[in-house]
Amino acid sequence: MTKKKRIYIAYTGGTIGMKPSKEGFVPVAGYLSQTIADMPEFFHDDMPDFEIFEYDPLIDSANVSPKIWQTLALDIQARYHDFDGFIILHGTDTMSYTASALSFVFENLSKPVIITGSQIPLSQLRTDARINLLNALYIAAYHPINEVSLFFNNQLFRGNRSSKQDADGFDAFVSPNYPALLEAGIQIKNIAGSKQALLNTRLNVSEIREQSVVILPLFPGIDWNILEMLLESPLQALVLLTYGVGNAQQDDKLLNILKSATERGVLIVNCSQCLKGKVNMGGYATGNSLLEAGVISGLDMTIETVITKLYYLLSQDLPISVVAELLTTNLRGELS
C-alpha cells in the first residue's frame, strides 16, 4: 500500500476559520480545527493526511508584517523534512503580499507551499472555503509545484504574480501578467506549472525585515512639494505609481526632485497604475525622462511583489547599486 502524503497546515487567521457571533464573524481558537474534524470529505481515502497548527493569537491579515512572514518561513523550515507539502491559511486582504514575500524568503524550495483562504467562513453554508482547502490539500499532495503559490476559486497562481482584484466575489485573485499554474476543473489541468526535480541543496530561509518604503500614486494636479518632503525624509525606497506603461507628467520640478533623490541613494521604482501590462520607460518621452532621472523600471511585477522584493533585498544589507540591479533581475519567476 502506498504511503499517504502528509501535509502541514499553518492556520494564521482570516475569514476561513471565523465563527459567527452577535457582533459578526470573529476568530476563535480551535474553531477551524473542530469544523474540519466534523467534515468527512477531508478524511476521504483519496485525501492526504494532514496536521493543523493554529497560530496564537490568530492574526487578521491587515495586521500581517514582515515579522509574521519570517515566523511563517521558520515554522515551515522547522517541519520541512516531516511533511510532503505545506498550506498556509491566511486572510485575503494581504494574501498576495505574504505569497510574494515568502517566494523571496525561501531559496532552494523543493516542496509545494500553497497559500489559501476564503471569502466566507468554512462553517457557513455557501462557503468557498471548503473547495479552496480541499483542492489545495489535494494539489499539494498529488500535483505538487515546488514554489510558493496561491490557490483561489479553482486556480493555482504563482504567489509573486498574484493580486487581489475583488473584495466581495469568489474570483478574488488574478495573475495579471502570468498564466495560472494549474486549473482545478473536472481534471486538474497543468497550464504553466512545472513539477521541478528535487534539489540536493538544503532549504535556505533568508531574513526579511521592515524597511522604509512608501507607495505614491501620481494623479493630475499632484503637489510636487509633498513628493519633495517625502523624499527628503529618511526613506530607502519609493514606489511611484505612474500612468499606462510608466509615464509621468513632463515637469522639470518633478524630474529634478527625482534625480536629486536617486543621486542621494534613494531607490525609486516605477510601477504602472494599470493592473495588467509592463512598464516601458523608453516608449514615450514622458517615461524616458524618468529613466534619465535614475528611476528603476518595475517591469511587469505586481505592486505587492515590488514592495516585498524591496523588503527582501534591503534586508540582505547589500550595496544600493546591487539592490537596484537585482530589482530588475528575475529571482523567483516574479517578472518576465
Image (cartoon, grey):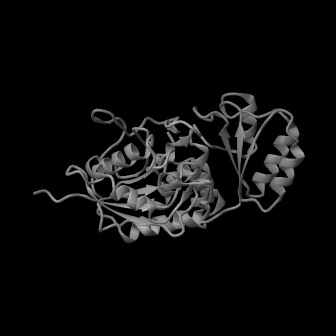
In the displayed structure, 164 sits above or below 208; it is above
Left or right of 46 on screen, residue 194: right
Of 109 and 59, the residue lying toward us: 59
Residue in view at x 52 percent, y 66 percent: 70
State the image coordinates of residue 104 (x, y, percent, origin top left): 50, 57
Of 279 and 263, the residue lying toward us: 279
State the image coordinates of residue 10 (x, y, percent, origin top left): 42, 62
Work out whether residue 144 can be spotted: no
Most extreme residue toward the top, as rendered?
Answer: 284
Of 231 and 11, the residue lying toward us: 11
State the image coordinates of residue 316 (x, y, percent, origin top left): 57, 66
Residue in view at x 60 percent, y 66 percent: 209
Most extreme residue toward the front, as rendered?
Answer: 22
- In the rendered picture of this protein, how many numbered marks are placed on residues? 0
Left or right of 168 on screen, residue 148: left
Quadrant of image for the N terminus: bottom left
Residue in view at x 35 percent, y 52 percent: 146
State the image coordinates of residue 294 (x, y, percent, origin top left): 72, 46
Work out whether residue 138 can be spotted: yes
